[in-house]
């Protein structure tokens, strides 16, 4: 029988979504009793959720308790450089290891994001961001490297991707989505060098949008 998500996992998902949507702002102090009320849970799973979010870089500990992480330009530059290296390597590995089902899922996600790109409202961008995060997750799982996936979790891949989409203009968004289609083509061809170069370009473009 498949085990459902634990209370801590459910609370982590709720709090992560609040953080990514900006409802908990950088520098905000995170009080366990208030978070428990928001998530509809006791303080024990909230405490575990905060530890998980700290590992993702969304939360940091201070002498006064947990606060929402704040990222400066230098921090973002460094994180994006690390992400480019790690995800590029992950794409290279995936080109040799991805299964047909994984390829089809990536192609479907790329098409769905393309169809959503015509609107600019927040909900539509959120839907693109969710599919984009799944695209990167499926690709990295296909790399077969637990180490790469673990290291990427430490450089907050999810929040960087999510927040970047809300900074894109129409042309930049189209370029980013085109990279997904090219990544699928490179993976279908089993060309690790091509896949790595496209992924590095993809991350570099996101970095440029963050700096802009």
Image: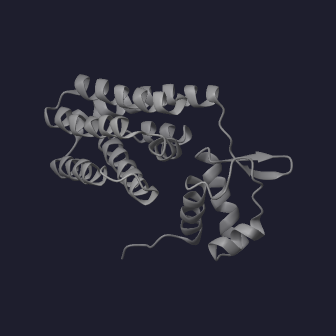
Q: How is the image coloured?
A: one colour
Indicate left or right for 190 with 8 as reference: left
Residue drawn at 37 percent across, 26 percent down: 200
Does residue 17 sit above or below 183 in this rendering? below
Indicate left or right for 45 with 82 as reference: right
Q: Position of residue 142 (x, y in %)?
A: 29, 43
Residue drawn at 63 percent across, 60 percent down: 49
Q: Name the residue nearer the viewer: 134 or 7.
A: 134
Q: Name the residue nearer the viewer: 127 or 45.
A: 127
Q: Position of residue 73 (x, y in %)?
A: 62, 28
Q: Quadrant of the N terminus?
A: bottom left
For residue 21, which quarter of the picture? Answer: bottom right
Please, which residue is most extreme toward the right here? Answer: 64
Q: Position of residue 159 (x, y in %)?
A: 53, 46
Residue drawn at 86 percent across, 46 percent down: 63
For residue 176, which quarter of the picture? Answer: top left
Q: Position of residue 72 (x, y in %)?
A: 66, 32
Does residue 4 sit above or below 137 in this rendering? below
Indicate left or right for 97 with 12 as reference: left
Does residue 32 sit above or below 169 in this rendering? below
Residue drawn at 37 percent across, 35 percent down: 172
Total marks placed: 0
Q: Name the residue nearer the viewer: 172 or 158.
A: 172
């Amino acid at each position: 029988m498949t085990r459902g998500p634990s209370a801590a996992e459910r609370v982590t998902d709720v709090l992560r979504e609040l953080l990514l949507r900006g409802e908990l702002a950088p520098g905000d102090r995170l009080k366990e009793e208030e978070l428990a009320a928001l998530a509809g849970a006791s303080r024990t799973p909230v405490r575990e959720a905060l530890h998980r979010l700290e590992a993702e870089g969304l939360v940091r500990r201070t002498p006064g308790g947990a606060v929402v992480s704040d990222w400066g330009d230098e921090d973002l530059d460094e994180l994006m450089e690390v992400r480019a290296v790690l995800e590029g390597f992950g794409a290279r590995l995936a080109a040799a290891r991805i299964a047909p089902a994984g390829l089809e899922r990536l192609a479907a996600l790329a098409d769905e994001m393309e169809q959503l790109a015509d609107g600019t409202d927040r909900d539509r961008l959120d839907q693109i961001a969710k599919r984009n995060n799944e695209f990167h997750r499926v690709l990295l799982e296909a790399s077969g490297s637990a180490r790469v996936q673990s290291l990427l979790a430490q450089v907050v891949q999810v929040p960087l991707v999510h927040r970047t989409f809300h900074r894109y203009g129409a042309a930049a968004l189209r370029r980013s989505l085109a990279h997904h289609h090219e990544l699928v083509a490179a993976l279908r061809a089993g060309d690790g060098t091509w896949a790595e170069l496209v992924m590095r370009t993809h991350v570099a473009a996101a970095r440029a949008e963050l700096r802009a």
